[in-house]
């Protein structure tokens, strides 16, 4: 459900301090994409194998120091595929951290671990190996900046005129803000939202909502305030915007607020935030002066 993504969006720096002290928006978006479209993500990165299930990403040493990986899959051949999402240049310290992750995962699960790094930075020289004594540790790096968003968007717009897009193509759509290209970010995101909206009759409603949420998270990362306001108009036309505003704006209008639409959205966000903290429905309704039915509608 969309609520699962909202809970991920609300993670604070304290939950991922072992990495950089904060959790970049593009990393959150990629993590949501990995959870939503794992098979397509592997195909996109040229990785072979079939996913059996997702594995926990928090490993704890005996001295109670937490290690937070970005995403783990158990593959059908028994191996573990460990994904890391990096928004900065990859350094040797990063490789040392990844090697620790691998060692702990392999020790705990008694499995072979393969690490793949999906990098969103403009990397000129890849640092993909670390030599330590007689051992050489290596990871596989995929740089999204090497992908052309402009050509991809034009290609998919033409295809959508005659047939539906497949899931791997939809994954590319939601990652276009992380690629290279001449199109401005506002235009790139606007056209990507249009592509998603064009699939409303072909995709399962909840799945499409999650895709739109990932793309909107990246819009918040890359766009200025005025640019984001323009993109919000596109969001209002999607199922994501319709869901939030249909459930939330009613409360603002009933209170006679001049900006009922904005107040309704704020109410929906507050309900989702409290639900993510496991606050009971009755208590949410009491705190926000809403009815239990209103709360349940937004959480359904």
Image: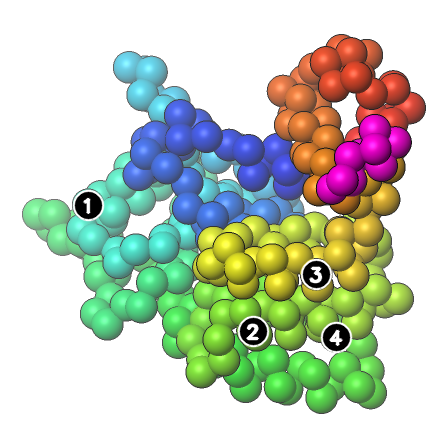
SS assignment at label 3: helix
SS assignment at label 2: helix
Residue 229 image offset from top left, x and y in percent: 60, 57
User: Which is more N-terminal, label 2 or label 1?
Assistant: 1
> Does residue 23 show up magenta in the picture?
no
User: Which is more N-terminal, label 3 or label 1?
Assistant: 1
Among the 4 quarters of the image, the one containing residue 234: bottom right
Q: Nearer the viewer, mark 3 or mark 4?
A: 3
Q: Which residue is mark 4?
A: 165
Q: CA distance from mark 4 to mark 2?
A: 18 Å
- The residue carrying pointer 1 sits among few (fewer than 14), some (14 to 19) or many (20 or more) residues within 10 Å by Cα, namely few
Residue 75 image offset from top left, x and y in percent: 57, 49
Image position of 265 with respect to 223: above or below: above
Magenta segment boundaries in residue numbering: 251-260
Determine whether, in the image, residue 122 is placed left or right of residue 227: left
The residue at 36%/24% (across/down) is: 66
Where's the C terminus, which quadrant? Answer: top right
Q: Which residue is mark 1?
A: 93
Residue 88 image offset from top left, x and y in percent: 30, 55
- The residue carrying pointer 2 sits among few (fewer than 14), some (14 to 19) or many (20 or more) residues within 10 Å by Cα, namely many
Task: Identify the disc placed on residue 188.
Answer: 2
Task: Identify the disc placed on residue 107.
Answer: none
């Amino acid at each position: 459900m969309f609520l699962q993504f909202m809970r991920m969006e609300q993670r604070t720096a304290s939950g991922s301090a072992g990495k950089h002290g904060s959790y970049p928006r593009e990393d959150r978006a990629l993590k949501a994409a990995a959870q939503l479209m794992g098979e397509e993500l592997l195909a996109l990165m040229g990785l072979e194998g079939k996913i059996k299930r997702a594995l926990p990403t928090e490993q704890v040493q005996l001295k109670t120091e937490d290690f937070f990986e970005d995403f783990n899959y158990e593959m059908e051949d028994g191996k573990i595929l460990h994904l890391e999402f990096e928004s900065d240049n990859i350094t040797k310290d990063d490789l040392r951290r990844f090697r620790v992750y691998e060692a702990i995962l392999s020790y705990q699960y008694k499995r072979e671990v393969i690490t793949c790094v999906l990098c969103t930075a403009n990397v000129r020289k890849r640092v993909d190996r670390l030599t330590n004594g007689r051992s050489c540790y290596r990871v596989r790096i995929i740089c999204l900046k090497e992908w052309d968003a402009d050509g991809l968007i034009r290609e998919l717009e033409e295809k959508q005129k005659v047939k539906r897009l497949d899931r791997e193509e939809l994954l590319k759509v939601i990652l276009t803000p992380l690629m290279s290209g001449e199109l401005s970010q506002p235009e790139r995101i606007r056209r990507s939202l249009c592509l998603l909206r064009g699939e409303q009759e072909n995709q399962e409603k909840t799945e499409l909502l999650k895709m739109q949420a990932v793309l909107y998270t990246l819009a918040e990362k890359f766009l200025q305030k005025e640019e984001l306001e323009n993109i919000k108009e596109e969001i209002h036309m999607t199922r994501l915007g319709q869901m939030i505003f249909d459930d939330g704006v009613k409360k603002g209008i009933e209170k006679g607020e001049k900006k009922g639409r904005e107040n309704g959205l704020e109410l929906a966000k507050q309900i989702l935030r409290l639900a993510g903290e496991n606050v009971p429905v009755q208590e949410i309704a009491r705190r926000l002066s809403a009815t239990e039915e209103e709360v349940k509608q937004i959480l359904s």
